[in-house]
Image (tube, rainbow, N blue to C red):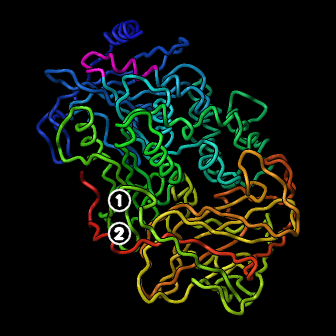
Amino acid sequence: MPSIRHALFLSGCLSLPVMALPASASAAPSSDGSGSCPVTKKTDVPVKMRDGTILRADIYTPKTSGKVPVLLMRTQYGKSGAQTKPSRYQRPEWFASHCYIVTVQDIRGQGKSGGTFYEYRYDRDDGYDTVQWASNLPGADGQVAMYGSSYVGATQWLAATASPPALKAIIPSNTGDDYYDGWTYEDGAFRLAFIEPWMLEDIASSAAENRGDKKLSKQLAADGENASIWMLYTPYNSLPPLHPENPQVAPYFFDAVAHPTRDSYWEAFQIRTHYDRVKVPVLAFDGWYDSFLSGAVNNFNGMRTAGGTPEARENQRLIIGPWDHIGWGRPDTVVSPRLKDIGPVANSPVNELTVQFLDHVLKGQANGYTDGPRVDYFTMGENRWHTAKSFPIEGTQYVTWYLGSAGRANSSMGDGSLATKPAKKPADSDHFTYNPANPVPSVGGHSCCSWTSGPQGQFDQSAIEQRPDILIYTSPVLEESVNVTGPITVNLFATTDAKDTDFTAKLVDVSPDGRAINLNNGIIRTSYRDSLSNPTPIVPGQVYEYHIKVWPTSNLFQAGHKIRLEISSSDYPQFAPNPNTGEAFGTTAASVIAHQTIWHDKAHPSSVILPILPASLAGEGIDHAPQN
């Protein structure tokens, strides 16, 4: 009922102080791109949810002669911070100075808001209620857009699947389509390096502070800062620092461990099956090394085919840069060193494009913003931006490269080969031993949330490639450049003597000086080979064909370089090591050694399918981030 929410707003705000912004935010457009509208701020404004819970928001109101749209952020990371650090978004005042009412709200059970926090559970209904409330703020024209990154992107998609009438656009960054696969798990493997530190240092800690338990909050934050110790602990279903004996602390963590398949628990939070309920244009941002890249691509494609209105289906845009989860390229961003070395061409245009998009969609301005489906993507190795109408890009050539060896592909010192034709006289197979107590270390990858505390980004793999439990398959020196842009599939014929195990794959660019740079990676838990909902045991000793989804990339392998594929059975701590016992996930500390065989004979042609983009389709590219 908008009239009741309007009354709540007025009764809760009249006594709050009004804060004037610095002159730079209220003057003509400035060097930092600020707009011309003066802005005032009100803090801790109450917003009543349908169940009576009071959430609180800060409101930044521009001084204008007419009514304006609302830009809303719903965050679990503190409304006063508004995701401005590390360097991602401009401050809310900056957006408000472009003549938008900006509202930043603490979600349920976090920050200054009431209620009990449980990740994802309340964000669909609370998002709907907040959008409708925001549309009735004094000075609002009835239109609401949402923005934010990571979980704050999840709050947007969940709200959008509730179809609030006032929601007209969302701008999600670094967020997924499914909180089971590609978020908490990946093709059956638990995403350890993301989930445990995130739960400890961030959401469980801040939820404890919200409840007034400062001692517990400090303990959780401290354990999160030293999460490498706790990631060694098994079984996961009794992780001590999250206090399994106390259901107030982190029930969502233990529920996630208890639901290792795609079941009704996860279906309740899904985006991927509800695109028909999303009726708005989307401007999304992600990175080649982000933990949710696959979900961002799925959202773009899902909305293109199943979005709730023709306008929504035709106005989807995805921008993919050479970024990890919070490293967006700007000078003060925390980003892995090799990505940072790419330079200003890699800087994210998120703030400027957000305003341009909003001005076009909500204010009807003909400002050069490009309508229609569009993907702007950065090609590494070339270090230029390109544009396409689809992803994967129409016209991509899928080329099969076959694994081969003389039987000793172990390590970079071995004889593994990668070629577009099967070797004429190959050995039948390669062998390695996987010990869960000594897993292959993660060196970069697509995890979360910062490269300083987890395995993300672009790194030289040379050191770990000397391990005998990594099989290395390398192409001849390339005589001309090869553009690999899109998703990669490894078709792996393998045998194990374990009851259950994992197989991993990683695509690598090898330069003439021997540096081996990771592009992207994937994993498959063998029992999940046919279904994420109904895993089935394997028969030890039997050959199975596994399809490993290596996440998308865009990389120009320069002439003189080599294409490499790494195959192993672990990638720790990015993924929890499979104990090989076949027991239910998270319930055991026991493990056994597995003996693995990778086949590449005529009957079992293990291969990797690479998406090759002809130069005529890639086009010339540009040396700056997209501007319209």
Percent of width and height locating residue 421: 60, 85
The residue wearing badge 2 is 617
Percent of width and height locating residue 249: 68, 31
Three-letter code, disc 1? Ala
Element type at mark 1? strand
Return the residue nearer the eye: 241 or 285.
285
Q: Is residue 333 visible to us here?
A: no
Residue occupying image coordinates x 66% and y 85%: 416
Percent of width and height locating residue 436: 79, 64
Q: Start and end of the magenta stretch?
A: 129-142
Report which quarter residue 592 is drawn in: bottom right
The residue wearing badge 1 is 388
Q: Does residue 576 show up magenta in the picture? A: no
Please tell me which of labels 1 and 2 falls first in the chain.
Answer: 1
Compared with 315, 464 (above or below) is below
Q: Residue furthest left?
A: 28
- Crowd class of label 1 (few under 14; some 14 to 19; many from 20; radius 10 Å): some
Q: Is residue 500 visible to us here?
A: yes
- Indicate left or right for 470 with 596 as reference: left
Three-letter code, disc 2? Leu
Percent of width and height locating residue 384: 32, 68
Compared with 362, 59 (above or below) is above
- Gap between marks 1 and 2, in whole Å? 9 Å
- Indicate left or right for 483 with 459 as reference: left
Element type at mark 2? helix
Residue occupying image coordinates x 39% and y 9%: 8
Residue 343 - label: none
CB atoms at circles 1 and 2 under 8 Å apart? yes
